[in-house]
Image (cartoon, rainbow, N blue to C red):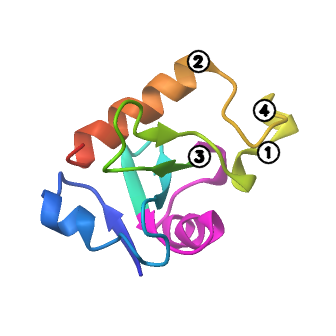
Amino acid sequence: MIRIIDKRIIVSELRKFLNQPFPEMIKFVVDIEKEILALGGEVHADAEEALLENGSEQKNLWGGNVYPDAIGEKLKYNSLINIRPSQNNRSLDVQDESLKNKIKVIVYKLLPL
């Protein structure tokens, strides 16, 4: 199940993504230009594909994982789609702190964490 989120959702909507397929984690891909995200899927590429089909550009898409029930940090900025030497990101993790912050702002704007 993949859903493109462009308006804040409520907790019960977010919780529907748990156990789909991961019990404690939900994958997401953020479009930092459109300030939307795709939520869900088994791999980040599924959510990435949904956003690309929705008109997003690859250069604006970054993946991560959200842990709604975590105590402390609820986001991890880790995904295969983040490996982009052409954008100075040579790791699964988003390395640029300002980009991480932009992702975090969008995620917290749209998801009830």
Do the numbered discs 4 and 1 sit on residues whose CB atoms are within 8 Å?
yes
Q: Which residue is mark 2?
A: 97
Which of 15 and 64 lies nearest the eye of the viewer? 15
Task: Please name the residue that numbered disc 3 is placed on.
Answer: 62
- Does residue 46 appear left or right of residue 80 in this picture? left
Earlier along the polypeptide chain: callout 4 or callout 1? 1
CA gap, disc 2 to disc 3? 13 Å
Does 66 sit left or right of 49 as displayed? Answer: left
Residue 32 makes an appearance in the image? no
Tag of residue 41: none
What residue sits right under mark 4 in the picture?
89
Could you tell me which quadrant the C terminus lies in? top left
Residue range of the region highlighted in magenta in the rendering: 39-61
From mark 4 to mark 1, how far is it between C-alphas? 6 Å
Which of the two discs, 2 and 1, labels the residue nearer the N terminus? 1
Residue extending furthest toward the bottom: 1
Q: Earlier in the sequence, mark 3 or mark 1?
A: 3
* Numbered label attached to residue 83: 1
Q: Amino acid at mark 2?
A: Glu
Element class at badge 1: loop
Observer able to see residue 101: yes
Residue for point 85% across, 36% down:
86
Of the image marks 2 and 4, the number of the one nearer the N terminus: 4
Q: Residue at x 25, y 63 (%)?
A: 14
- In the image, residue 58 lies in the stretch drawn in magenta: yes
Query: Can you say whether 35 is above or below 21 in the image?
Result: above
Where residue 50 sits: x, y (%)? 51, 72
